[in-house]
Amino acid sequence: MSNADIKSNRPLSPHIQIFKPILTMVMSIVHRITGAALYFGTVLVAWWLIAAASGPAYFDFVNEIYGSFLGRLILFGFTWALVHHMLGGIRHFIWDMGYGFGPQAREWLVRANLAGSIVITILLWIIGYAVR
Amino acid sequence: MSDMRTPLAKVRGLGSAKEGTEHFWRQRLSAVANVFLITFFVIFIIATQGASHAELTSALSNPVVAILMALTVASAVYHMKLGMQVIIEDYVHGEGLKYVTLIANTFFCALIGFGSVFAILKISFGG
């Protein structure tokens, strides 16, 4: 028997698929997904800055894309991902300091994280439209 | 042969990668910086959204704004490079593909970082 056969015959440890999804677990995954989304979202920031450095004509062209309905929708999602990931990061800081591991505390933290990210995102966009 | 080293001796060797908790620590350090810098960034975006090219470049020509923007880009790009590295190490198991994606991660972050900082400096230096 080759080594590969021994490997394939080994029993597998249970992975996340067999567990009932609970809020803390889902939010852990969402934290990673928002991080990955923000990673690719930086292309929009770099493009915007480089457009501004390229001159008024090209900047107006990029501004128009960002200002379109689809552009705004993506930027709204970007804002939420950013706020959500930051609040999630603060949740991790609280855990790093040794607090918030109790059943009630961790449940409260994820709820505050989700509710906070939605409220702050909407507030930021209201402020954005109000100051223009 | 059994391992005769004490746990303390192993910790002093900083593990198999000889980095100990360095990756974790840098990830958290850039996260702390991001809390402040991204807050500045969001305020700046709200203040300049809808602005004309002249208004935006004049705002970015302020040295304090330019310095904070460059620091924001540097900290964010470093943080995301560390984060994506963990995602790749978690999900990409083929040795070859793992190295290709890890290298691509570094290149992408460097490109975003240098591109953005260059643009900020060009605008800030008046040009």
Image (cartoon, helix red, strand yellow):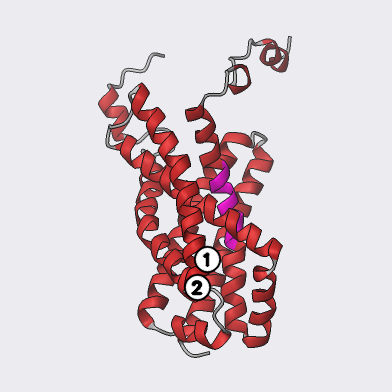
In the image, the segment drawn in magenta is: A33-42
Between B89 and B11, the one nearer to me in the picture: B89
**Chief secondary structure of the magenta portion:** helix
The residue wearing badge 1 is B113
Between B54 and B22, the one nearer to me in the picture: B54
Which quarter of the figure has residue B99?
Answer: top right
Dot 2 and dot 1 within a common chain: yes
Asked whether, in this view, residue B45 is left or right of residue A76, the answer is left
Asked whether, in this view, residue A84 is left or right of residue A8, the answer is left
- Amino acid type indicated by mark 1: Gly
Above or below, comparing residue B31 to residue B122 in the picture: above
Which quarter of the figure has residue B21?
Answer: top left
Q: Are marks 2 and 1 in contact (CB under 8 Å)?
A: yes
Above or below, comparing residue B111 to residue A64 in the picture: above
Above or below, comparing residue A24 to residue A57 in the picture: above
Residue B108 visible in image: no
The residue wearing badge 2 is B117
Residue B37 visible in image: yes
Position in image of residue B7 (x %, y %): 29, 23
Residue at (67% x, 35% y) in the render:
B94
Q: Report crowding for label 1: few under 14, some 14 to 19, many 20 or more residues within 10 A (C-alpha).
A: many
Above or below, comparing residue B55 to residue A4 in the picture: below
